[in-house]
Image (cartoon, grey):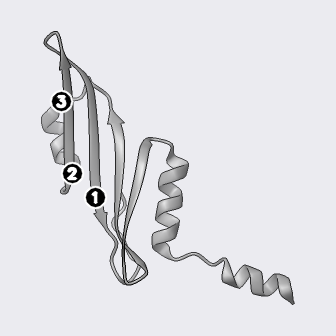
Amino acid sequence: MKNINKQESLELAPSEIQVLEMIRNKRFISIKLIIKNGEVDVIEGLERMHTGERIIDLLKQHDFQNLEIKQSNGKIVCVNRIFRKKVSPSGKTKRS
């Protein structure tokens, strides 16, 4: 009986599943959660991008993002992107 109660208490919300998927993806350097009223409201992910990608292509990939571009000796050496994903109250979210 105790095992059933533990399993029920471990049931994850759709937003929690999204966070775990992002962690397991291993492409993110960091993940930030913004919580409102005890629920995940926004998920932010910081990822290092390939420097060979065109900047215009990176801009088209997400509607809400910040790009950090580092240049040395006239060449792009590092591109970091922080993108934001709003979690809908119903738990249905857009996948990245």
Residue in view at x 80 percent, y 85 percent: 4
Q: CA distance from mark 3 to mark 1?
A: 21 Å
Image x and y of residue 46, in percent: 35, 46
Image x and y of residue 34, in percent: 35, 68
Q: Amino acid at mark 3?
A: Arg
Q: CA distance from mark 1 to mark 2?
A: 6 Å
Q: CA distance from mark 2 to mark 3?
A: 16 Å
Residue 33 lies left or right of residue 51; in this view the side is right
| Viewer-nearest residue: 73 or 16 | 73
Q: Amino acid at mark 1?
A: Arg
Callout 3 environment at 10 Å: few (<14), some (14 to 19), or many (20+)?
few
User: Helix or strand or loop: what does disc 3 sit on?
Assistant: loop
Disc ID at residue 71:
none
Q: Earlier in the sequence, mark 1 or mark 2?
A: 2
Callout 2 environment at 10 Å: few (<14), some (14 to 19), or many (20+)?
some
User: Helix or strand or loop: what does disc 1 sit on?
Assistant: strand
Residue in view at x 58 percent, y 75 percent: 12
Q: Which residue matches tag 3?
A: 54
Q: Which residue matches tag 2?
A: 65
Q: Earlier in the sequence, mark 3 or mark 1?
A: 3
Q: Which residue occupies the extreme right position in the image? A: 1
Q: Are marks 1 and 2 in contact (CB under 8 Å)?
A: yes
Residue in view at x 36 percent, y 51 percent: 45
Q: Amino acid at mark 2?
A: Gln
Q: Which residue matches tag 1?
A: 84
Question: Residue 15 is drawn in which quadrant?
Answer: bottom left
